[in-house]
Amino acid sequence: KNQVEQSPQSLIILEGKNCTLQCNYTVSPFSNLRWYKQDTGRGPVSLTIMTFSENTKSNGRYTATLDADTKQSSLHITASQLSDSASYICVVSATNRSGYSTLTFGKGTMLLVSP
Amino acid sequence: DAGITQSPRHKVTETGTPVTLRCHQTENHRYMYWYRQDPGHGLRLIHYSYGVKDTDKGEVSDGYSVSRSKTEDFLLTLESATSSQTSVYFCAIRRQDSGSGNTIYFGEGSWLTVV
């Protein structure tokens, strides 16, 4: 069964500090991995996408890494801001030989950035 | 912004009553999805559509039906609402983004409370 596990479940950091969120997956056949940010009361918004051949991808202060061998991804947030307070969701896509894709969602990491 | 509008955004209904949630998109996307999001479960797929009158079940489809009579509208119906269907419902579309492959874009959510 395809699974995506995220850690930690929740995290509190001080404004200006860095943090790293983890995502471990057992999804096959792997197609890509996305990180979404979900503000309270809003829908999730895509931050980055990682394909099999990519190790690192940045989007402003967000940097995602992917290790396809160990099936792990991380999302690093640099110089956190209050607006970074949100839930971060890891989503892994599997595409079979027929081209049919399925998504497996992690439960998310709730980040609170404190002043 | 992927031009997704959900209605109603908030609804309180009584057990046993029918409820219909509407998802409207303005960009003519073929694929549309309904997810529910609950604490401890993350996002779970209820039903999806791959064209007008073409729909299929997701992992938590029991108690739900959908219809898509027009490309722009995807309706989710709870025939007889139960308290276990109290949740936040997200509509989503799939869009082909240059350089990023297919991306799932979510609406703002519909908060449903069944009392």
Image: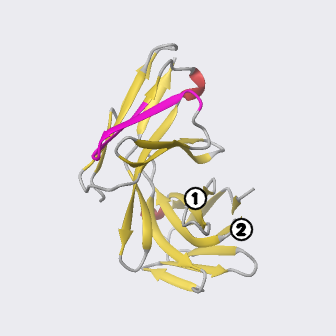
> SS at mark 2?
strand
The amino acid type of the residue labelled 1 equals Leu
Q: Does B66 lie within the magenta span?
A: yes
Circles 2 and 1 on the same chain = yes
As drawn, the label of residue B66 is none
Q: In this view, does B86 lie above or below A8?
A: above
Q: Is residue B99 above or below residue A40?
A: below
* Residue A78 visible in the snapshot: no
The amino acid type of the residue labelled 2 equals Asn
Q: Where is residue B2 in the image (x, y as percent from the top left)?
A: 30, 58
Q: Is residue A79 above or below residue B12?
A: below
As drawn, the label of residue A24 is 2
Q: Is residue B28 left or right of residue A95?
A: left
Residue at 44 percent of width and 44 percent of height: B90
Q: Position of residue A93 (x, y in %)?
A: 58, 65
Residue at 54 percent of width and 77 percent of height: A50
Q: What stretch is highlighted in magenta?
A: B62-76
Q: Where is residue A39 in the image (x, y as percent from the top left)?
A: 44, 54
Q: In this view, does A97 lie to the left or right of B66?
A: right
Q: Where is residue B56 in the image (x, y as percent from the top left)?
A: 51, 43
Residue at 43 percent of width and 76 percent of height: B100
Give whichever of B88, A78 is nearer the camera.
B88
As drawn, the label of residue A103 is 1
Q: Is residue A11 left or right of residue B75?
A: right
Give whichever of B80, A60 is nearer the camera.
B80
CB under 8 Å between callouts 2 and 1? no
> SS at mark 1?
strand
Residue A92 placement: quadrant: bottom right
Classified by dominant secondary structure, the portion drawn in magenta counts as strand
Residue B67 placement: quadrant: top left
Q: How crowded is mark 2: few (under 14 residues within 10 Å), some or many (20 or more)?
A: many
Q: Which of marks 2 and 1 is nearer the N terminus?
A: 2
